[in-house]
Amino acid sequence: MAQLVSSWSNGVQSVPKDYVMPPERRPGDFIAVCKEIPVINLQNDRSEVVQQILKACQEFGLFQVINHGVSEKMMADMRVLYDEFFNMPIEDKLGLYAKTYGKGCTLHTSGINYGKEEVHFWKDTLKHDCHPLEEHSPSWPDKPARYREEVGKYAIEVRKTGFKILNLIGEGLGLTEGYFDRVSQEQYMAVHLYPQCPDPSLAMGIDGHADPNIITFLQQDQYGLQIQKDGKWMGVDPIPNAFVVNLGYTLEIISNGRLKSVEHRVVTNSTASRTSIVTFFAPSPTLPVSNELPVIIEPAKELVTTCNPPKFKSFQYKDFVADYLAFMRKPRPRDGTPLDPYRF
């Protein structure tokens, strides 16, 4: 537990050497906040919203949504709850601690495998599955006492918003109605704490990467998120009570390359800690009508024609995730992406 950054970083005057990134992996020069990232009001005219989302997915692979249906009070309550969780005594979190990223409900530090990292990231993460709620919530933290009740309600509301946006994306692409319902997404959360850092020029919250899943929803309270566009990093401005929505590799494949997953990273802050509450939607390992038939990921048939042949091979999602995790464990810098073996 002493490895948790939050357990020892308060008041430190310098970055420990095993958290100092090599020069090529440091944040670099000052990155300006991008004012062009779309902010989409989900209460506007549906056809207008569909076109706005589709354009944002093509140009940025990311957008922010407001008036999305999750109440301001619920989002504020979540911020308070996770502040309480990460500030609890170590002994109250001991049962959740794991040295590696794994299944179930775990609390870990840095990246996927702390023990094998050349250098560590300046973050702690609580991760757990969310759907079906009754199956997973018993393994969630029992402290703070209201954790399971409040996070359960939040997970339900974010799920509604998630499918609302996926259906709007499907409509914009011209997919059959209910396409994403049939894939039956898994839903899980990762709550990251990036403590105050004495020298943000040396440390990183997380390296540049794109998510393997379908779509990701981020609730953030401080600046720190950056995305790469046209070979340059740009900052994402936190908007109160908005969700940042970014596309994963799986949605890029389903769209046959029409939409783009976005590479993103997190920088640290010398004046404030940052908590991000992240919800992921991903394919289930098996079809909802069968616990044996695997879910096959491939370009949607509606988008494949003689003039627009498939750009990606068909594959089982579990195989892709295994390749993604292996890729992420490789020492930096890396060439290519986890998508490369799956392209035609």
Image (cartoon, rainbow, N blue to C red):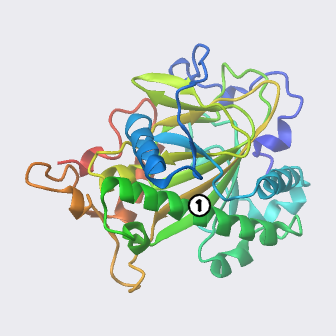
Left or right placement of residue 131 versus residue 185 in this view: right
User: In the visual, does 301 lie left or right of 248?
Assistant: left
Pick the front one: 203 or 282: 282
Q: Is residue 132 visible?
A: yes
Q: Is residue 100 visible?
A: no
Q: Amino acid at mark 1?
A: Thr
Q: Residue 281: x percent and y percent?
A: 51, 61
Residue closer to the observer: 2 or 211:
211
Q: Is residue 15 left or right of residue 257?
A: right
The residue depicted at 59 percent of the width and 66 percent of the height is 160
Residue 127 vertical position relative to residue 51 in the rendered view, above or below = below
Label 1: which residue? 161
- Pointer 1: residues within 10 angstroms few (<14), some, or many (20+)? some
From what the image shows, is residue 176 above or below residue 174? Answer: below
Q: Classify mark 1: helix, strand or loop.
A: helix
Q: Residue furthest left?
A: 306
Q: Could you tell me residue 320's position as x and y percent?
A: 36, 58
Q: Nearer the viewer, residue 42 or 83?
A: 42
Find residue 20 and report its image quarter. Answer: top right
Residue at (80% x, 72% y) in the render: 149
Rendering coords of residue 268 (x, y %): 70, 29
